[in-house]
Image: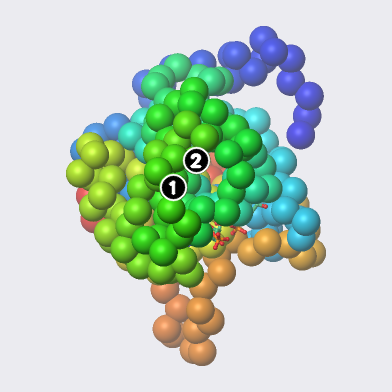
């Protein structure tokens, strides 16, 4: 990624949301009382990270700014344990205006150590575990939320209902590939933002690890709106009618 000065970052990230050019992309999110938005940044050949898990950075600074803005428009940001393990993210809006969403970490067997930054108590955080996971009420400062399902397959509709019961209705599923793919396969995503960067990786962690289709006619097909975002392209796919 090109080097940006701190001042350039500030200009990029604090650009007001209400600029007319932003409306097609952010309007559907600003106007929705509830949504589940999945998001990934991938290479041209469909990978979201190198084989060893490094993914910083595939897309450019404008796309990172976009991610922070969507966090600010969401009640909760959801990521899988693999992303916490690989990236140790903070999942905050520290680089743009707007509140931090509640962090929701899917760690079905409660294997992540409490030393990860998402457990530091700086932002409300839930760790979602299966009922069979080891007995614990907290991981670091984060509250453990038990949901139905198994350690291999959490019951995602039950998770959505549990989050809704806590007032968390606007969900940003920020990765990784397994987590977004499972929300998609469960029919829970209303929208997808996929940023495609003009680069090839050859091998890596796939964007959408889904069961294969045997016939092209059976493959789900979508319509998308295409937004240039810096040197990348952001594909905005509405999966359910507004
Ligand atoms: N380019 C991007 O946009 C982007 C975004 C985020 C992350 N990443 C990269 O992607 C990689 C991680 O992605 P990933 O696909 O390997 O993993 P991931 O989706 O981050 O996490 C997968 C893990 O989360 C848990 N999990 C998620 N959904 C579950 C469900 N419905 N039921 C049960 N468990 C569930 C499981 O934990 P257990 O392992 O405990 O079973 C699962 O193995 C990292 O390298 C990260 O850097 C890239």
Q: Residue 16, position in %: x, y? A: 44, 17
Left or right: residue 118 versus residue 148 is right
Q: Could you give the CA–CA distance between mark 1 and mark 2, rounded to whole angstroms?
A: 7 Å
Q: Secondary structure at mark 2?
A: strand
Q: Residue at x 51, y 16 (%)?
A: 14
Q: Nearer the viewer, mark 1 or mark 2?
A: 1
Q: Quadrant holding ligand 1?
A: bottom right
Say which quadrant the N terminus sits in.
top right
Q: Residue 54, position in %: x, y? A: 74, 48
Height in image: 87 above or below 151?
Answer: above
Height in image: 89 above or below 213?
Answer: above
Label drawn at residue 101: none
Q: Residue at x 58, y 39 (%)?
A: 114
Residue designated by label 1? 136
| Mark 2 closeness class: few <14, some 14–19, many ≥20 residues within 10 Å | many
Q: What is the tally of numbered marks visible in this picture? A: 2
Q: Is residue 222 visible?
A: no
- The answer to whether mark 2 is within 8 Å of ligand 1 is no
Snapshot quadrant of residue 219? bottom left
Label drawn at residue 139: 2
| Mark 1 closeness class: few <14, some 14–19, many ≥20 residues within 10 Å | few
In the foreground, 52 or 114: 114
In the foreground, 204 or 153: 153
Snapshot quadrant of residue 4? top right
Height in image: 93 above or below 27?
Answer: above
Q: Is residue 99 visible?
A: yes
Left or right: residue 43 versus residue 241 is right
Q: Residue at x 40, y 60 (%)?
A: 130
Q: Are marks 1 and 2 in contact (CB under 8 Å)?
A: yes
């Amino acid at each position: 990624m090109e080097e940006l000065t701190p001042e350039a970052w500030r200009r990029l990230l604090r650009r007001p949301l209400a600029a007319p050019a932003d409306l097609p992309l952010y309007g559907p999110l600003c106007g929705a009382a509830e949504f589940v938005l999945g998001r990934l940044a991938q290479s041209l050949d469909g990978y979201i990270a190198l084989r060893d898990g490094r993914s910083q950075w595939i897309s450019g600074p404008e796309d990172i700014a976009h991610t922070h803005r969507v966090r600010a428009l969401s009640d909760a940001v959801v990521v899988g344990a693999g992303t916490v393990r690989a990236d140790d993210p903070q999942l905050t809006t520290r680089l743009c205006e707007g509140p931090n969403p509640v962090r929701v970490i899917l760690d079905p067997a409660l294997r992540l150590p409490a030393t990860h930054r998402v457990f530091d108590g700086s932002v409300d955080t839930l760790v979602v575990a299966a009922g069979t996971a080891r007995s614990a009420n907290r991981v670091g400062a984060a509250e453990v939320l038990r949901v139905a399902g198994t350690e291999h397959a959490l019951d995602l509709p039950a998770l959505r209902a549990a989050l809704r019961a806590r007032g968390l209705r606007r969900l940003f599923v920020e990765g990784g590939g397994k987590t977004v793919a499972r929300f998609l396969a469960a029919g829970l995503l209303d929208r997808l933002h996929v940023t495609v960067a003009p680069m090839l990786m050859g091998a890596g962690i796939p964007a959408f690890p889904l069961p294969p289709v045997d016939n092209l006619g059976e493959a789900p097909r979508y319509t998308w709106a295409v937004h240039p975002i810096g040197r990348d392209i952001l594909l905005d796919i509405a999966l359910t009618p507004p």
